[in-house]
Amino acid sequence: MSAQPPATPGPTGRRRAGAATAPGAAGASGGAGASGGAGAAGAAGASGGAGAAGASGAAGASGASGGAGAAGGAGAAGVTSGTGGAGAVGVTSGTGGASVTPTTGVADGGTGMHDPDHLGASSAPGSASELTGTLRLLRLAARRDRVVLPVWIVTLAVLWMASIASIAGLYGEATARVQYAVTVAPNVVARAFEGPIFGTSLGAVLMTETFGVFAVLTGVMSLQAVVRHTRLEEETGRAELVGSAVVGRYAALTAALLLTFGTNLLLGTVVTLLLLAYGLPAGGAILVGLLLMGVGWSFAAVAAITAQVAGSARGANGMAGAVLGLAYFLRAVGDGLGEGAPSGVAVISAWPSWVSPIGWGQQARAFADERWWVLGLFAGLVVACVWAAFVLTRHRDVGVGMRPVRAGPATASRGLRSPVGLAWRLQRPAVVGWTTGLLLAAGVFGAIGDEVDAFLETSDELAELFAGLVESGELVDLFVVFLMGLLAVAVGAFAVQGVLRLRSEELSGRVEPLLSTAIGRARWVASHMVVMLVATTSMLLLIGATSGAAFGLVTGEWGERFWGWVLAGLVSLPAVWVLAGVVVLAVGVLPRWAAAIGWGAIGASLVMGQMGALFDLPQWVLNISPFTHVPAVPAEDLEWLPVLVLLAVAAALTAAGVVALRRRDLVT
Amino acid sequence: MTSTPAIHVAGLTKTFGPVTALDHFHLDVATGEVHGFLGPNGAGKSTTIRILLGLLRRDSGEVVLLGGDPWQDAVQLHRRLAYVPGDVHLWPNLTGGEAIDLLGELRGGLDRQRRAELIERFRLDPTKRCSTYSKGNRQKVAIIAAFASPVELYLLDEPTSGLDPLMDTVFQACVRDVVGRGSTVLLSSHILAEVEALSDRITIIRDGRQVESGTLAELRHLTRTAITVQTRSALAGLHHLDGVHDAEVEGTRARFEVEPDAMATVQRWLADREVVALTSSPPTLQQLFLRHYGQRLTDAEVADDPDGGDPATGGSAEVAETWR
């Protein structure tokens, strides 16, 4: 992989998950949502995550990867506890940054080195000086991300290894691969959920099964890294301090991009080496590494733009996340709308796949009739986006987005003048974003529910997974249980994000003026819990209804079937609340680890609850997940005991968390 | 001043891991007074105030706030007090006006008319989002929210940091206003002029300990008057007088400092030598303050800062010692 494209930053690219949290299938959605916070993030995360989870569920191999992804997400989250955490670390690094570059000589060296990459694009006059300090900032960024980025790369590498091993095990036989290909190619659901297939080689099957998921994860990693080192820096005021030193106008953005590009280069290299190690053809292995890198670079470049346009770091993450979600969605639509090739073992995707960088990665047909020229699309997109970002940088003030901040009301409305009003105001964007994304997913899934039989034929593993959920029942019922369980975990991710708001409010110091009024800590927690309870209830109700309605529209089956969908959603609520309770307890007892624990719980729920059957985990392990105990409505009758027990556990965890929170010092 | 103190803190100790933020700290604030709370950065002012607010929990010691326990009775007590932090963090997507209303309402309601009046006086645009406010403007939001609430006690933690001098004046007027209506103010600051202008009594904190407390007059008593004098007769022997410090005598001209108790004697002594010209600078809090923290200067910086070793620091080490 020595012949990689330009821009090889010296220091190891690593980034902290500051904003980021939880990569991994549905975990990924949580991550995007967490940092994005803004609605769009939720939406993007939700659709991307759901898609990813769907894909991973489809076969044992990527089922494993999805599960591990979630677990990996926990790991990444563990590194830093949420957005706010950035502050503490950043202060030190920020100060370091201030002392940056007393000598221009060093900085100019940096400029010279990186000039070809970005300057060509920026076409700015006197651009050499505008890049002054880039190298120093790059080292600062690499140093700050020295834990997070390695965790991402290692996690992704482990997932790749698991996927390769699993696919090699399942489809080692040529006949098995041919059978797989002939089932996937003509099936709309399989194409949309898993990805297009272009041949019967082991590598081709691997690409179909895994590339979409890894593309999403790589995108999340990349966009968060760029926003973290640009907009978030501005928001914390550190960029101002750094910018007052001998640092050029473009230095920060360039450093962020170089770090992210370098990280992706490393990731691509690792993936290529892994593929080679498993004996896959060198050409395909190199292409896949480059494609993954291309996806990462693309979303880094997209984030470079959203970081200029959005009103805040959260907003920038959210916008870029929405683009990522859209990219995944478009390729799913394009592949779904496509048709089987005459060979019977390949797909000709429709145009929407070609509007998506994730789609490009698949359309390059690695390990089949490889189209290397697709790499040019990535190059074009990256150059265009980076150029646009640099142009935007010139026209933007530090700390402000392109969109002017509108004036607002001079007085608070009646609704805002209470803790609950404030909590709703703070969580509203996330609620709207997550709801939009999840409803979109719910609608799509509901609409294809009637094709589930055909879908299940593509994978014995998925059939086994379904069978593991309940002892018996109609296939459609099983699909409802599976899907609603999955969406409920996504709602759980929203709940975790919502409750973690307690922690970010504390870390940001905003809770200090609030708690110095006549609002006690218990009431403060309660205000956010009320919003969480109402939002999760509405979301699951709407999700069930949307899926049910979409299913009804397609199949004409309403009545009991529709209510089955709705009930399957609602019955998961207590499990969602248990997760929220876990986070409250964590905020009370182990505040520093609250974010890690919250996202870890989501990852674990996904692994144990949804994918557990695939892994043959012992029952007692599965029992740890609250979702394991959710009655399998509508495949089985509604049992009240587990529901009540879950409610009690949720209440107890929350109460314990409040008690602990009332006993500890607040971070001030 | 009534007999029940608004704040009574005795033997208060608070540690953060290995760091002792407050070490048997004492503070008494009488009802109806403006109490200046002086100390350099990191002395423990904010920690004290956060313990008074029940945001932090004390390790040991006695803390009584408005007759209650700030940790146990936080909510009830908070209805009767208002707080302005030194570094105000607000919700970026709320407007200043919304934040004022929210904080006021959560405190138990605010005086709408007073709110409007304060917004006018502080020249705050309440329709702007908090994310677009400068530090000074965020500070104004908290100050307006606090003063628009008619409460018994105002806890102000370096409230004017970031305010321009004009707004400083408005702020001082507000403090006088609420005190005139019988409220108590604890004003933490490191701006001596502000404390001097407003405070009835002052407590000085250093390294988590109280080093001085008293009325302005009492504290002034501890400081010296600086005198420059020209006489007809030679001033030899001046520096032997009791209560005279740092005397620089050049024939008939001298510069020195004198303790309040020695003033009368020194005046008579000077009068005997026929004073031609005399200027005296009144004792300021500045000197007192410098003296408390001057020791650090003497230890660390005086060597390479001749001006730092001026009168205030000369005798400060010993004085500070006796105050321990």
Image: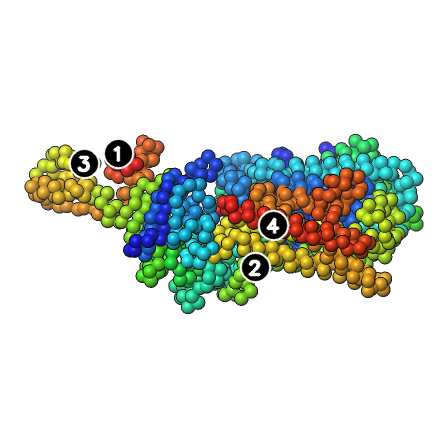
Tell me the mark number nearer the camera, choosing from 1 and 4.
4
Q: What element carries label 1?
A: helix
Return the residue at label 3: B248
Residue A251 showing in the rendered view: no
Indicate the position of residue A341 as horizontal and vertical percent values: 90, 50
Indicate the position of residue A386 as horizontal and vertical percent values: 65, 48
10 Å neighbourhood of mark 4: few (<14), some, or many (≥20)?
many
10 Å neighbourhood of mark 2: few (<14), some, or many (≥20)?
many
Place residue A72 in its image quadrant.
Answer: top right
Return the residue at label 2: A420
**Does the CB distance between marks 1 and 4 fall below 8 Å?**
no
The amino acid marked with disc number 1 is: Glu
Q: Nearer the viewer, residue B211 or A224?
A: B211
Report the Cα–Cα distance between label 1 and label 4.
Answer: 57 Å
Q: Which colour scheme is used?
A: rainbow
Return the residue at label 1: B318
Report the Cα–Cα distance between label 3 and label 2.
Answer: 68 Å
